[in-house]
Protein backbone atom coordinates (compact mmCIF):
# COMPACT_ATOMS: atom_id res chain seq x y z
CA UNK A 1 0.00 0.00 0.00
CA UNK A 2 2.86 2.36 0.84
CA UNK A 3 4.32 1.77 -2.63
CA UNK A 4 1.02 2.64 -4.26
CA UNK A 5 0.82 5.90 -2.29
CA UNK A 6 4.37 6.88 -3.27
CA UNK A 7 3.65 6.00 -6.90
CA UNK A 8 0.52 8.17 -6.88
CA UNK A 9 2.58 11.11 -5.59
CA UNK A 10 5.56 10.69 -7.96
CA UNK A 11 3.57 10.34 -11.18
CA UNK A 12 2.08 13.90 -11.08
CA UNK A 13 5.49 15.35 -10.09
CA UNK A 14 7.23 13.63 -13.01
CA UNK A 15 4.51 14.85 -15.39
CA UNK A 16 4.90 18.46 -14.14
CA UNK A 17 8.70 18.38 -14.48
CA UNK A 18 8.47 16.90 -17.98
CA UNK A 19 5.93 19.53 -19.03
CA UNK A 20 8.10 22.41 -17.71
CA UNK A 21 11.19 21.01 -19.45
CA UNK A 22 9.29 20.78 -22.72
CA UNK A 23 8.08 24.39 -22.35
CA UNK A 24 11.60 25.65 -21.66
CA UNK A 25 13.00 23.68 -24.59
CA UNK A 26 10.47 24.96 -27.14
CA UNK A 27 10.75 28.51 -25.79
CA UNK A 28 14.51 28.37 -26.37
CA UNK A 29 13.84 27.36 -29.96
CA UNK A 30 11.37 30.17 -30.51
CA UNK A 31 13.31 32.90 -28.63
CA UNK A 32 17.04 32.18 -28.78
CA UNK A 33 19.27 34.20 -26.45
CA UNK A 34 21.64 36.79 -27.94
CA UNK A 35 24.80 35.74 -26.21
CA UNK A 36 27.58 37.39 -28.23
CA UNK A 37 27.73 40.75 -29.87
CA UNK A 38 28.75 40.61 -33.50
CA UNK A 39 32.22 41.93 -34.28
CA UNK A 40 32.30 45.57 -35.33
CA UNK A 41 32.79 46.08 -39.06
CA UNK A 42 35.28 48.92 -38.39
CA UNK A 43 37.40 49.90 -35.40
CA UNK A 44 39.64 52.79 -34.43
CA UNK A 45 43.32 51.89 -34.06
CA UNK A 46 45.82 53.92 -32.02
CA UNK A 47 49.53 53.07 -31.96
CA UNK A 48 52.18 54.70 -29.78
CA UNK A 49 55.84 53.96 -29.23
CA UNK A 50 58.86 54.90 -27.16
CA UNK A 51 60.66 56.55 -28.82
CA UNK A 52 58.11 58.25 -31.07
CA UNK A 53 58.29 58.67 -34.86
CA UNK A 54 58.52 54.92 -35.45
CA UNK A 55 57.26 53.62 -38.79
CA UNK A 56 54.06 51.54 -38.60
CA UNK A 57 53.37 48.85 -41.20
CA UNK A 58 50.21 46.75 -41.15
CA UNK A 59 50.15 43.77 -43.48
CA UNK A 60 53.10 45.42 -45.22
CA UNK A 61 51.31 48.75 -45.87
CA UNK A 62 52.57 51.96 -44.28
CA UNK A 63 50.16 53.74 -41.92
CA UNK A 64 52.56 56.55 -41.02
CA UNK A 65 54.62 57.22 -37.91
CA UNK A 66 53.83 57.08 -34.22
CA UNK A 67 51.92 58.43 -32.44
CA UNK A 68 49.24 57.13 -34.81
CA UNK A 69 45.82 58.47 -33.89
CA UNK A 70 42.30 57.44 -34.91
CA UNK A 71 43.09 55.17 -37.86
CA UNK A 72 39.91 53.48 -39.09
CA UNK A 73 40.39 49.78 -39.84
CA UNK A 74 38.24 46.72 -40.41
CA UNK A 75 38.00 44.10 -37.67
CA UNK A 76 40.27 41.14 -38.33
CA UNK A 77 43.72 39.64 -37.85
CA UNK A 78 46.75 41.73 -38.88
CA UNK A 79 50.54 41.55 -38.92
CA UNK A 80 52.00 44.69 -37.34
CA UNK A 81 55.58 45.89 -37.88
CA UNK A 82 57.12 48.78 -35.90
CA UNK A 83 60.58 50.06 -36.85
CA UNK A 84 62.84 53.05 -36.29
CA UNK A 85 66.38 53.66 -37.38
CA UNK A 86 68.95 52.57 -34.74
CA UNK A 87 66.26 50.61 -32.86
CA UNK A 88 65.27 46.96 -33.01
CA UNK A 89 62.09 46.41 -35.01
CA UNK A 90 59.08 44.69 -33.49
CA UNK A 91 56.69 42.34 -35.27
CA UNK A 92 53.46 41.06 -33.82
CA UNK A 93 50.09 39.68 -34.84
CA UNK A 94 46.99 41.42 -33.50
CA UNK A 95 43.36 40.39 -33.56
CA UNK A 96 41.05 43.43 -33.67
CA UNK A 97 37.49 42.72 -32.61
CA UNK A 98 34.68 43.87 -30.28
CA UNK A 99 36.40 47.13 -29.38
CA UNK A 100 35.49 50.60 -30.64
CA UNK A 101 39.04 51.84 -29.93
CA UNK A 102 42.06 49.51 -29.95
CA UNK A 103 45.25 50.98 -28.45
CA UNK A 104 48.72 49.46 -28.88
CA UNK A 105 51.93 50.67 -27.21
CA UNK A 106 55.48 49.54 -27.98
CA UNK A 107 58.90 50.12 -26.38
CA UNK A 108 61.74 49.81 -28.92
CA UNK A 109 65.22 48.76 -27.79
CA UNK A 110 68.32 50.50 -29.20
CA UNK A 111 70.47 48.46 -31.58
CA UNK A 112 73.93 47.62 -30.22
CA UNK A 113 76.25 48.27 -33.12
CA UNK A 114 79.17 45.91 -33.66
CA UNK A 115 82.61 47.32 -34.40
CA UNK A 116 83.64 46.40 -37.94
CA UNK A 117 87.34 46.66 -38.81
CA UNK A 118 88.05 49.31 -41.38
CA UNK A 119 90.15 46.99 -43.55
CA UNK A 120 90.40 43.22 -43.38
CA UNK A 121 93.06 41.36 -45.29
CA UNK A 122 93.27 37.63 -45.98
CA UNK A 123 96.74 36.15 -46.44
CA UNK A 124 96.47 33.47 -49.13
CA UNK A 125 100.14 32.48 -49.30
CA UNK A 126 103.46 33.28 -47.80
CA UNK A 127 104.65 35.37 -50.73
CA UNK A 128 101.33 37.13 -51.76
CA UNK A 129 98.80 39.22 -49.86
CA UNK A 130 95.34 39.51 -51.48
CA UNK A 131 93.07 42.28 -50.29
CA UNK A 132 89.59 41.22 -49.20
CA UNK A 133 86.59 42.53 -51.10
CA UNK A 134 86.23 46.22 -50.38
CA UNK A 135 83.00 47.54 -48.85
CA UNK A 136 80.63 49.58 -50.99
CA UNK A 137 79.20 53.06 -50.47
CA UNK A 138 75.53 53.47 -51.40
CA UNK A 139 74.04 56.94 -51.76
CA UNK A 140 70.29 57.28 -52.40
CA UNK A 141 68.22 60.39 -52.73
CA UNK A 142 64.59 60.73 -53.71
CA UNK A 143 62.46 63.50 -55.19
CA UNK A 144 60.79 64.46 -52.92
CA UNK A 145 62.98 63.55 -49.96
CA UNK A 146 61.81 61.77 -46.83
CA UNK A 147 61.03 58.36 -48.34
CA UNK A 148 61.39 55.24 -46.19
CA UNK A 149 64.22 53.03 -47.48
CA UNK A 150 64.54 49.24 -47.38
CA UNK A 151 67.40 47.02 -48.55
CA UNK A 152 66.46 43.36 -49.07
CA UNK A 153 63.35 43.94 -46.97
CA UNK A 154 65.21 45.50 -44.02
CA UNK A 155 64.33 49.06 -43.11
CA UNK A 156 67.46 51.25 -43.20
CA UNK A 157 66.15 54.80 -42.72
CA UNK A 158 64.97 57.70 -44.88
CA UNK A 159 66.22 59.52 -47.95
CA UNK A 160 68.62 61.20 -48.41
CA UNK A 161 70.50 58.05 -47.38
CA UNK A 162 74.16 57.08 -47.43
CA UNK A 163 75.91 53.98 -46.07
CA UNK A 164 79.55 53.07 -46.65
CA UNK A 165 79.69 49.66 -44.96
CA UNK A 166 77.74 47.49 -47.40
CA UNK A 167 79.14 44.27 -48.76
CA UNK A 168 79.29 43.86 -52.54
CA UNK A 169 76.39 41.96 -54.06
CA UNK A 170 72.88 42.18 -55.41
CA UNK A 171 70.27 44.07 -53.36
CA UNK A 172 66.63 45.00 -53.81
CA UNK A 173 66.16 48.69 -53.05
CA UNK A 174 62.66 49.81 -52.07
CA UNK A 175 61.48 53.36 -51.37
CA UNK A 176 58.10 54.26 -49.95
CA UNK A 177 56.53 57.61 -49.16
CA UNK A 178 52.94 58.35 -48.27
CA UNK A 179 51.09 59.77 -51.27
CA UNK A 180 53.55 58.30 -53.83
CA UNK A 181 53.91 55.02 -55.69
CA UNK A 182 56.49 52.61 -54.28
CA UNK A 183 59.89 52.60 -56.01
CA UNK A 184 61.66 49.26 -56.35
CA UNK A 185 64.92 48.45 -58.11
CA UNK A 186 67.47 45.62 -58.11
CA UNK A 187 70.99 47.04 -57.75
CA UNK A 188 74.38 45.37 -58.06
CA UNK A 189 76.91 46.85 -55.65
CA UNK A 190 80.46 46.25 -56.84
CA UNK A 191 83.53 46.07 -54.64
CA UNK A 192 85.15 49.41 -53.91
CA UNK A 193 82.62 51.40 -55.91
CA UNK A 194 80.36 54.30 -54.93
CA UNK A 195 76.80 53.68 -56.11
CA UNK A 196 74.62 56.79 -56.45
CA UNK A 197 70.89 56.48 -57.11
CA UNK A 198 68.29 59.21 -57.62
CA UNK A 199 64.66 58.12 -57.59
CA UNK A 200 61.88 60.42 -58.77
CA UNK A 201 58.76 59.27 -56.95
CA UNK A 202 55.49 59.32 -58.86
CA UNK A 203 52.71 61.03 -56.88
CA UNK A 204 49.47 59.17 -56.32
CA UNK A 205 46.61 61.40 -57.41
CA UNK A 206 42.84 61.48 -57.40
CA UNK A 207 40.14 64.03 -58.15
CA UNK A 208 37.70 66.25 -56.26
CA UNK A 209 34.18 67.25 -57.34
CA UNK A 210 32.78 70.17 -55.33
CA UNK A 211 29.22 71.46 -55.75
CA UNK A 212 27.18 73.88 -53.65
CA UNK A 213 23.60 74.93 -53.17
CA UNK A 214 23.32 77.62 -54.36
CA UNK A 215 26.03 77.37 -56.98
CA UNK A 216 28.57 80.00 -58.00
CA UNK A 217 30.80 79.79 -54.90
CA UNK A 218 34.57 80.30 -54.98
CA UNK A 219 36.71 77.35 -53.91
CA UNK A 220 40.13 77.17 -52.25
CA UNK A 221 42.35 74.11 -51.83
CA UNK A 222 44.66 73.99 -48.79
CA UNK A 223 44.42 77.77 -48.44
CA UNK A 224 45.10 78.55 -52.13
CA UNK A 225 42.13 80.06 -53.97
CA UNK A 226 41.36 78.47 -57.31
CA UNK A 227 40.98 81.53 -59.53
CA UNK A 228 38.31 81.98 -62.18
CA UNK A 229 36.53 78.86 -60.99
CA UNK A 230 33.12 78.66 -59.35
CA UNK A 231 31.03 75.71 -58.23
CA UNK A 232 30.33 73.20 -59.57
CA UNK A 233 34.03 72.49 -60.08
CA UNK A 234 36.13 69.37 -60.65
CA UNK A 235 39.76 69.41 -59.55
CA UNK A 236 42.00 66.79 -61.13
CA UNK A 237 45.49 65.50 -60.28
CA UNK A 238 45.11 66.19 -56.56
CA UNK A 239 47.71 64.36 -54.41
CA UNK A 240 46.19 61.59 -52.33
CA UNK A 241 45.68 62.32 -48.66
CA UNK A 242 43.75 64.76 -46.53
CA UNK A 243 43.03 68.26 -47.88
CA UNK A 244 41.22 71.36 -46.63
CA UNK A 245 38.55 72.80 -48.92
CA UNK A 246 37.33 76.38 -48.40
CA UNK A 247 34.07 77.63 -49.93
CA UNK A 248 33.07 81.30 -50.14
CA UNK A 249 30.04 83.02 -51.63
CA UNK A 250 28.84 86.56 -50.93
CA UNK A 251 25.79 86.51 -48.70
CA UNK A 252 26.58 83.07 -47.27
CA UNK A 253 28.63 81.78 -44.38
CA UNK A 254 32.14 80.62 -45.30
CA UNK A 255 32.48 76.86 -45.24
CA UNK A 256 35.47 74.66 -44.43
CA UNK A 257 35.48 70.91 -45.05
CA UNK A 258 38.13 68.20 -44.76
CA UNK A 259 38.25 65.67 -47.59
CA UNK A 260 40.35 62.58 -48.21
CA UNK A 261 41.51 62.01 -51.77
CA UNK A 262 42.13 58.40 -52.79
CA UNK A 263 44.25 57.19 -55.69
CA UNK A 264 42.38 56.96 -58.97
CA UNK A 265 39.06 57.94 -57.41
CA UNK A 266 36.88 61.05 -57.51
CA UNK A 267 35.81 62.32 -54.11
CA UNK A 268 32.45 64.13 -54.36
CA UNK A 269 31.18 66.70 -51.86
CA UNK A 270 27.87 68.58 -52.04
CA UNK A 271 27.55 71.50 -49.62
CA UNK A 272 24.41 73.40 -48.64
CA UNK A 273 25.45 77.00 -47.93
CA UNK A 274 23.85 78.94 -45.08
CA UNK A 275 22.65 82.43 -46.04
CA UNK A 276 23.85 85.22 -43.75
CA UNK A 277 22.22 88.65 -43.60
CA UNK A 278 23.22 92.07 -42.34
CA UNK A 279 21.40 95.33 -41.67
CA UNK A 280 21.38 98.38 -43.95
CA UNK A 281 20.08 101.81 -42.95
CA UNK A 282 19.50 104.59 -45.55
CA UNK A 283 18.52 108.19 -44.85
CA UNK A 284 17.91 110.69 -47.69
CA UNK A 285 17.69 114.47 -47.26
CA UNK A 286 15.37 116.06 -48.31
CA UNK A 287 13.99 112.87 -49.88
CA UNK A 288 14.60 110.38 -52.69
CA UNK A 289 13.56 107.09 -54.22
CA UNK A 290 15.71 104.12 -53.15
CA UNK A 291 16.82 101.28 -55.43
CA UNK A 292 18.98 98.32 -54.40
CA UNK A 293 20.50 96.15 -57.13
CA UNK A 294 18.16 97.93 -59.60
CA UNK A 295 15.12 96.85 -57.59
CA UNK A 296 12.77 99.54 -56.24
CA UNK A 297 12.74 99.50 -52.45
CA UNK A 298 11.09 102.74 -51.33
CA UNK A 299 9.55 105.65 -53.26
CA UNK A 300 10.03 109.26 -52.11
CA UNK A 301 11.61 108.24 -48.79
CA UNK A 302 12.17 111.14 -46.37
CA UNK A 303 12.74 109.06 -43.22
CA UNK A 304 15.36 106.46 -42.25
CA UNK A 305 14.75 103.30 -44.25
CA UNK A 306 16.05 100.01 -42.76
CA UNK A 307 16.19 96.52 -44.20
CA UNK A 308 18.14 93.23 -44.11
CA UNK A 309 20.27 92.09 -47.05
CA UNK A 310 22.54 89.09 -47.69
CA UNK A 311 26.08 89.80 -46.54
CA UNK A 312 28.25 91.06 -49.41
CA UNK A 313 28.26 93.77 -52.09
CA UNK A 314 25.14 95.57 -53.25
CA UNK A 315 24.52 98.56 -55.53
CA UNK A 316 22.50 101.34 -53.90
CA UNK A 317 20.95 104.06 -56.07
CA UNK A 318 19.01 107.08 -54.82
CA UNK A 319 17.12 109.26 -57.29
CA UNK A 320 15.74 112.83 -56.87
CA UNK A 321 13.88 114.45 -59.78
CA UNK A 322 15.64 117.81 -59.31
CA UNK A 323 18.98 117.03 -57.67
CA UNK A 324 19.86 114.01 -59.80
CA UNK A 325 21.04 110.70 -58.42
CA UNK A 326 23.58 109.09 -56.13
CA UNK A 327 24.85 105.55 -56.84
CA UNK A 328 27.50 103.46 -55.13
CA UNK A 329 28.50 99.87 -54.33
CA UNK A 330 28.37 99.20 -50.59
CA UNK A 331 29.29 96.19 -48.48
CA UNK A 332 26.81 94.76 -46.00
CA UNK A 333 28.38 93.09 -42.97
CA UNK A 334 26.91 90.53 -40.61
CA UNK A 335 28.62 92.00 -37.56
CA UNK A 336 27.95 95.72 -37.91
CA UNK A 337 24.96 97.59 -39.46
CA UNK A 338 25.84 99.59 -42.59
CA UNK A 339 24.57 103.17 -42.49
CA UNK A 340 24.19 105.54 -45.46
CA UNK A 341 23.20 109.19 -45.16
CA UNK A 342 22.74 111.17 -48.39
CA UNK A 343 22.14 114.94 -48.15
CA UNK A 344 21.35 116.35 -51.58
CA UNK A 345 21.41 119.87 -50.08
CA UNK A 346 25.11 119.55 -49.26
CA UNK A 347 27.91 120.62 -51.62
CA UNK A 348 31.60 119.68 -51.59
CA UNK A 349 34.61 121.43 -53.21
CA UNK A 350 36.15 119.61 -56.20
CA UNK A 351 39.28 120.68 -58.12
CA UNK A 352 39.12 120.13 -61.89
CA UNK A 353 42.40 120.30 -63.82
CA UNK A 354 43.89 119.22 -67.17
CA UNK A 355 47.37 118.31 -68.46
CA UNK A 356 48.94 117.45 -71.80
CA UNK A 357 50.86 114.24 -72.58
CA UNK A 358 54.05 115.76 -71.17
CA UNK A 359 52.35 116.54 -67.85
CA UNK A 360 52.21 120.28 -68.43
CA UNK A 361 49.24 122.23 -67.09
CA UNK A 362 46.55 122.74 -69.70
CA UNK A 363 43.90 125.46 -69.91
CA UNK A 364 40.50 124.27 -71.12
CA UNK A 365 36.80 125.03 -70.75
CA UNK A 366 35.00 123.11 -67.96
CA UNK A 367 31.61 121.51 -68.61
CA UNK A 368 29.48 120.03 -65.81
CA UNK A 369 26.34 118.01 -66.56
CA UNK A 370 26.52 119.12 -70.20
CA UNK A 371 26.79 122.85 -69.56
CA UNK A 372 29.78 125.23 -69.74
CA UNK A 373 30.24 126.77 -66.29
CA UNK A 374 32.10 129.81 -67.61
CA UNK A 375 35.43 128.78 -66.08
CA UNK A 376 38.67 127.18 -67.28
CA UNK A 377 41.08 124.70 -65.74
CA UNK A 378 42.42 124.56 -63.14
CA UNK A 379 39.37 125.50 -61.10
CA UNK A 380 37.73 124.62 -57.79
CA UNK A 381 33.95 124.21 -57.92
CA UNK A 382 31.32 123.32 -55.32
CA UNK A 383 29.24 120.38 -56.49
CA UNK A 384 26.08 118.97 -54.98
CA UNK A 385 26.23 115.44 -53.50
CA UNK A 386 25.53 112.84 -56.21
CA UNK A 387 26.61 111.87 -59.71
CA UNK A 388 27.85 114.53 -62.15
CA UNK A 389 29.09 114.42 -65.74
CA UNK A 390 32.43 116.22 -66.19
CA UNK A 391 34.62 117.07 -69.21
CA UNK A 392 37.20 119.65 -70.34
CA UNK A 393 37.06 121.03 -73.90
CA UNK A 394 39.31 123.12 -76.14
CA UNK A 395 39.34 123.66 -79.87
CA UNK A 396 41.86 121.37 -81.58
CA UNK A 397 42.07 119.00 -78.59
CA UNK A 398 40.12 116.05 -77.23
CA UNK A 399 39.93 113.85 -74.12
CA UNK A 400 40.78 110.19 -75.03
CA UNK A 401 38.65 108.86 -72.15
CA UNK A 402 35.76 111.19 -72.98
CA UNK A 403 33.22 112.52 -70.51
CA UNK A 404 33.37 110.90 -67.06
CA UNK A 405 30.66 110.25 -64.49
CA UNK A 406 31.95 111.45 -61.13
CA UNK A 407 30.39 110.67 -57.74
CA UNK A 408 30.54 113.50 -55.22
CA UNK A 409 30.23 112.38 -51.61
CA UNK A 410 32.28 112.47 -48.42
CA UNK A 411 34.35 109.41 -49.46
CA UNK A 412 35.11 110.41 -53.05
CA UNK A 413 38.27 111.93 -54.52
CA UNK A 414 38.44 115.72 -54.27
CA UNK A 415 40.40 116.26 -57.48
CA UNK A 416 39.76 115.29 -61.13
CA UNK A 417 42.39 115.61 -63.87
CA UNK A 418 41.81 115.28 -67.63
CA UNK A 419 44.48 114.25 -70.16
CA UNK A 420 44.26 116.41 -73.31
CA UNK A 421 45.60 115.30 -76.70
CA UNK A 422 45.88 117.28 -79.93
CA UNK A 423 43.64 116.29 -82.82
CA UNK A 424 45.77 115.32 -85.84
Image: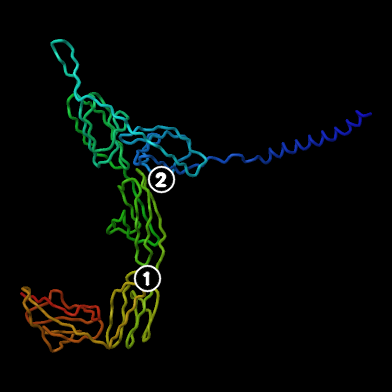
Given this view, does label 2 or label 1 mark the residue nearer the observer? 2
Q: x, y (%) of residue 274?
A: 41, 64
Of all residues shown, which one is farthest toward the right?
1
Relative to 158, is 319 above or below? below
Asked which quadrant contains residue 105, the reply is top left
Q: Which of marks 2 and 1 is nearer the N terminus?
A: 2
Residue density around tag 2, few if under 14, some if 14–19, many if 20 or more, within 10 Å: some
Q: Which mark is residue 147?
A: none
Q: In this view, does 249 lie to the left or right of 162?
A: right
Q: How is the image coloured?
A: rainbow
Judge by depth and name the residue closer to the eye, 244 or 50: 50
Q: Which residue is drawn at 41% across and 45% down?
A: 69
* Element at label 1: loop
Relative to 72, is 359 above or below? below
Residue 190 shows in this picture: no
Query: Which residue in the structure is indicated by mark 2?
Result: 69
Query: Which residue in the structure is indicated by mark 1?
Result: 335
Judge by depth and name the residue closer to the eye, 219 or 72: 72
Q: Is residue 41 left or right of residue 215?
A: right
Asked which quadrant contains residue 150, the reply is top left
Judge by depth and name the residue closer to the eye, 213 or 222: 222
Q: Is residue 73 left or right of residue 417?
A: right
Q: x, y (%) of residue 290?
A: 34, 81
Q: x, y (%) of residue 418?
A: 13, 77
Residue 362 shows in this picture: yes
Q: x, y (%) of residue 212?
A: 38, 59
Q: Distance between the residues labelled 2 and 1?
A: 38 Å
Amino acid sequence: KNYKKIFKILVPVILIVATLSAVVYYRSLLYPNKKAKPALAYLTLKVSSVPTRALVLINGDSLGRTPLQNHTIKAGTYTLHISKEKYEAKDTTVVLENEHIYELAFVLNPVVEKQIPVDKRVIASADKTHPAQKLVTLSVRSIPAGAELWLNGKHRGQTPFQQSSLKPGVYRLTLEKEGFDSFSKVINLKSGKIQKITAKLIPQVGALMIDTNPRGARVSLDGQEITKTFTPVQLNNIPVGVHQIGIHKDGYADYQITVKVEQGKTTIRNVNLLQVKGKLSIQVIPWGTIYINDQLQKSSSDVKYELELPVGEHTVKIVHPTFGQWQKKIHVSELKPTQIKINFNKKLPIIISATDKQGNEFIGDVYIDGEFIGKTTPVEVNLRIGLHRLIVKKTGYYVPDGEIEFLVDSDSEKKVNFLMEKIH
